[in-house]
Amino acid sequence: MKAPLDKNARVALFAGVAAVTMVGAAFASVPLYSLFCQVTGYGGTTQIAIGEAGAVLDREMTVLFDANTGRGLPWEFEPVQRSLTLNVGESGLAYYRATNVSDRPITGVATYNVAPFKAAIYFSKIECFCFTEQTLEPGESIDMPVLFFVDPLIAEERFLDDVHAITLSYTFFETDGAASSPSDAAP
């Protein structure tokens, strides 16, 4: 017959289980948070659309475009157009331009958000360059498209009646050129 664990062994076992649980939770937190943001639109996370909205409303929405670079990235990055006004449900196409102003090849990846945050869940991207690595040679420029629409369901939310403009903001960061996260690779 086995002897029961003494008090010190039980404390050590509990501490070990707690440590393994915390490490597991740390690794799971990023994909779970990403999933939470995609489902709720929290933090300005947009939706990914497979196709166009299907319905176009009489309500106009202005989409403002913003571009930033992470610290130390020697790229010029800007929207080709500053804004686009379209009807809710109507597909819009915008371009962002990146230029490598350094003397070396650089790989970058863009993240995005939408403001106001409360409208983010209704901003749907059909095609986007976000989370897809872009490698630019010295002096090279690239125009990158974003195809999107504002979901007509926004009209059903009374707390969004005051939203007449949405800002789509991208920030490019330098990467080491390894494969990027596939979590949002399509749009």
Image: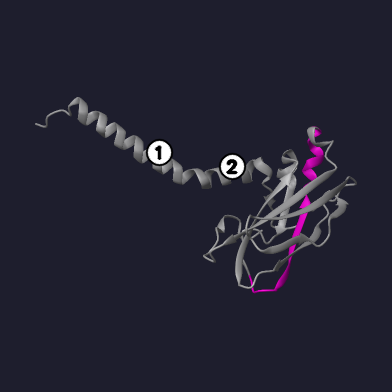
Could you tell me which residue is drawn at 72 percent across and 71 percent down? 141
> Which residue is more in the foreground, 82 or 54?
82
Tell me, for residue 36, which label it has, or none.
Answer: 2
Could you tell me which residue is drawn at 85 percent across and 54 percent down? 83
Task: Say which of marks 2 and 1 sits in front.
Answer: 1
Work out whether 102 lies above or below 4.
below
Work out whether 119 lies above or below 178.
above
Can residue 133 be seen here?
no
> Which residue is more in the foreground, 163 or 91?
163
x then y, percent, for residue 3: 12, 29
**Dot 1, how many residues are within 10 Å of its Cα: few (below 14), some (14-19), or many (20+)?**
few
Tell me, for residue 22, which label it has, or none.
Answer: 1
- Range drawn in magenta: 136-158
> Which residue is more in the foreground, 119 or 16?
16
Tell me, for residue 156, which label it has, or none.
Answer: none
Which tag, 2 or 1, sits closer to the chain's start? 1
State left or right for residue 106 relative to residue 19. Answer: right
Q: Amino acid at mark 2?
A: Phe
Residue at far top of view: 7
Could you tell me which residue is drawn at 86 percent across and 55 percent down? 84
Work out whether 121 lies above or below 15.
below
Q: Secondary structure at mark 2?
A: helix
Q: Are marks 2 and 1 in contact (CB under 8 Å)?
A: no
x then y, percent, for residue 138: 66, 74
Q: Secondary structure at mark 1?
A: helix
